[in-house]
Structure formats: structure tokens, C-alpha cells
Amino acid sequence: MNNYDQKKLSNQVKHNRKYRWLRIPVITVLSLLFLVVVIFNTAKGRSIAQEFAELFRHADGDLIPREILRAIITEEPIQTGTPTPNPGDIKNLIYTIEEIEQMVGHHIAEPSWLPFELVFEGASYDPVDQEVFINYDLYVKRLKAGDGGLFITQELNPTSEPCFFCGLVGASVPIERVKIGSVMGEYVIGMWHFPEEGAVYEPFPFIQRLRWRVDGVEFEFYYLGDAGVVTKEELIAIAASME
């Protein structure tokens, strides 16, 4: 192997290491995000979380044993008949912001500034939990649409009982206080995933989350993608532009 081939191979290895996170099934990751936000919004989960009124909060550890998860899940009443579509599911984000505003009867906040890599994909509304979902796809040269993006939730009535996993992060994950316009918010990386032993929090650097409250509305950003494409500072700027 000549010097040119060696250098080419070395550069390819460095490239593969740098972007190895792209091999993670993105739909699986997004599904887990929705699982955390929606599926665990059960009766017992809400009662456990009632005492928490802050944004992000630490669990006792980075692992929640399977027995606790089973207790939460079995509290969910069994549904009969046709299941109600999950508004936060990717395939149900089919509305425009204007259509969502007609559903709720008032203005819905949306970003007035976005990096050019993020493009509006769709929105939805859950009238039961009074929660709005907005999705922006990520477009960059090495990715195709749908391989990442920014998912925004707006809880219009945050005084209602929260879900068990909403805002819950692993004990070892730093919660960073950040300024968003005139208010303070909180920033973390990572998410829960669910192997056989229970729920495990992993500090994935390609999942960034931001939570804050303004005028009685609770917002959360879930960004899935290279932190070098949309940075923490840009996520904060997007949040500050919500109007």
C-alpha cells in the first residue's frame, strides 16, 4: 500500500468514527422519544410525578428497574375498540400551524428563526392533554430528510398532572441552566432506552433537549442530529425566537 492509499484509508477511518452515530436507526430513536413522552403518561406515572414542578429532574439512578416500569404500565387501562391515534406519532404530524391554531382557537408559538438545515414537516394537537407537536426535518449534505430533526412540544395547560418520564433524566446527567430570552430554561443531552433490565438513561450527544416555560405554556425541544450541525447555542436561539 502506497502513502496515498494509507492516507486515504486513515481519513476514511476518522470519518467513520466521527459519524458513527448515523448508523443508529433514527426511527427507533424517535419512537423511543415518543414512548417517553406519550406512552408513559399513565395514571400511576402522573401520580408519581405530581410532586415535581420543575423542568428537568434527576432520577435516583441511571437505571429504573423493570419491576417499576411494569407497575407503571399495568396501571394503564386496557383499551377496547379502535385505538385513538397518537398525535405525537410521526405519521400523524400532518397539519399546518394555521390548522392547529383553528383547532385550539388561538395563536400557537413557532420559531421566527431557524437554521436553514431545519425545514417544517408537520404538526399535530392532542386535545386531551392540550399539547401541540411540531416537527422540523433536518436537511444536510450527508443526510436525507427524515434522518433527524427538531421535535417541539407545547403543553398549553402545564398545571395538569405530568407524565412519569417527562423531564426525568438519569442521575449522572448534568442539568444545565440556560437563558432563553427573558426566562431561564434547562438543557440536557441523551434519552432513556428500554433494554430487558428496565429503563436506562444514555447521554447520547446526538440527542439534545431543552425545556422552559413562558406565559403559562411549557415548551420542550428534542433535537436529533449532529450537534455540529445544530448547536446548543442555536437551539437556544430558536427557543428565544418562539413567538
Image (cartoon, grey):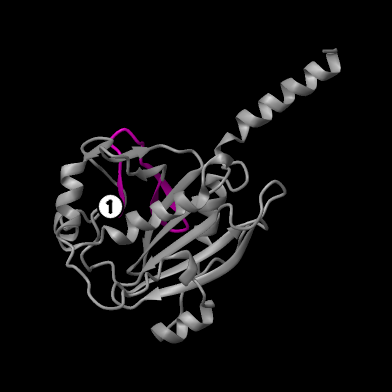
Q: Is residue 167 magenta?
A: yes
Q: Position of residue 194 (x, y in %)?
A: 32, 44
Looking at the image, which is closer to me, 49 or 85?
A: 85
Which residues lie in the magenta part? Answer: 165-187
Answer with the quarter of the image where residue 77 lies: bottom left
Identify the amino acid type marked 1: Phe
Q: Position of residue 213 (x, y in %)?
A: 36, 61
User: What kind of element bears circle 1?
Assistant: loop
Q: Is residue 44 left or right of residue 31?
A: left
Task: Say above or below: 12 vs 149.
Answer: above
In the picture, measured across the screen, residue 67 lies left or right of residue 125, that is left
**Drawn side of residue 194 relative to residue 92, left or right:** left
103 left or right of 136 in image: left
- Residue sitting at 32 percent across and 69 percent down? 216
Name the residue furthest front. Answer: 81
Residue on which disc 1 sits: 165
The x and y percentages for residue 188 are: 40, 43
Query: Does any portion of residue 112 appear in the rendered image?
Result: no
Residue 16: image location, x then y, percent: 64, 31
Residue 159 is covered by the magenta coloring? no
Which quadrant of the view contains residue 9? top right
Residue at (34, 72) in percent of width and height: 156
In the rendered view, would you say 59 is above or below 158?
Answer: above
